[in-house]
Amino acid sequence: NSRSISLLKLRASLGRTGNQGLGDYPYQSTYCTANYGDEPGYYPCNLGNTALGWEKTTQTNLGFDLELWNGRAAFTADWYNKSTTDLLLSRPIPGSSGYTSFTDNIGAMRNRGLELVFTAVPLQPTRADGLRLVTTINLSFNRNQVTALYNDQPFSTGYYDMNRVAVGHPLGEFHAYKFLGVDPTTGDAIYKDTNNDGDITTEDKTFVGNPWPDYTGGLTTTVSWNRFDLTGFFQFSKGNKVFNGMRVFSDEGGYNYDNKFSDVLDRWQQAGDQTDQPRASFDGTSGARLISSRMIEDGSYIRLQDLTLGYQLPEAVAASMRLSNARLYIRGQNVFTSTDYSGYNPEVNSNGSTASASLATDFYAYPVARTWSFGIQAGW
């Protein structure tokens, strides 16, 4: 009999699922075809693992749905704790075996998060052709952590081994040299000597950025009046880092033949220059070519992903075309993006959408197209 609460539902669930999402025959030792001096042949190309099993994911969910004032406002919240064991990953092995890796169940990972959805109808018309406004916002928070590996041994993956899988860290966290700036006297890049031995070696690589965002979300707003309707959808991400792999060639001090981005116009050129762009050096002595946190950028963005304007034709006009109803619309997708990322698209992974351990890498990924379309929706 509540006048304000029209729906309140509490939810809880606990379950376990399996995953076998791998390529073909990873458990078998296989041979591949090859051509040796125009003669056909075979070579061993996959080291099998007959003990390979399913990944197992155990997940707990708690949530509730709340609706107020007969649908004028609604709120949904879900908390989850998702633990995955027996991870199916490519495990590195010594090359002297004839192979460099094989698929194994070698670790565990945990994801914890909160998902929130809020919908409001601040303007509700009293008649059919009145002004109506509906807004929905959703937020998602996820915290990822690798909790176990084979003998707790970390390994690297992705382009230039930039993604690191290590116990106690997010999956695929960036691991490279830490760029500290440019020496204003020499123009050379300065990197952090993490082990304090006086030299910059591979032992000085450290974690330099998290590809997982602090939060992601979306905002959808629909305004309708008379026969017109306008819908806009924004999506956003905050706090994630992106490895701009294009800068390995476009911002490496002048050695390679690739075109350069305009950032190099700010490079060090004379003693006293204050900049974060090392001097040009065709011999590589400036240190600009070293794969480092200098290529790690903030991937936060907000994008107007979809914008649609529609008009419902009068019934008489639709009937004259032998239609029961008709709606004209114009729609834009990827209308604009606001971001500090210098590449083409902050929402990118050149390693592919299934490369869970090699995240947020941009290596000349094709830009997302902006499209406009016109159409008619009709019924008979």
Image (spheres, helix red, strand yellow):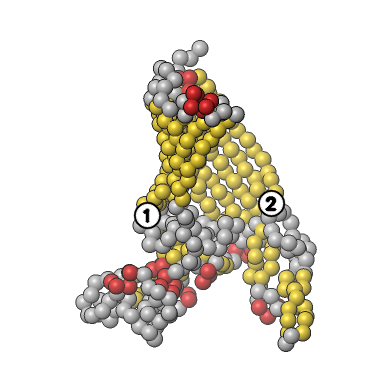
**Quadrant in the picture for residue 260:** bottom left
At mark 1, the secondary structure is strand
- What residue is rendered at 47% in x and 75% in y? 203
Residue of label 2: 19
Q: Are marks 2 and 1 in contact (CB under 8 Å)?
A: no
- What residue is rendered at 54% in x and 54% in y? 145
**Quadrant in the picture for residue 282:** bottom left
Q: Is residue 320 left or right of residue 309?
A: right
**Quadrant in the picture for residue 153:** bottom right
Q: Is residue 224 above or below residue 182?
A: above
- What residue is rendered at 68% in x and 55% in y? 21
Q: Amino acid at mark 1?
A: Thr
Q: CA distance from mark 2 to mark 1?
A: 35 Å
Q: Amino acid at mark 2?
A: Asn
At mark 2, the secondary structure is strand
Residue of label 1: 339
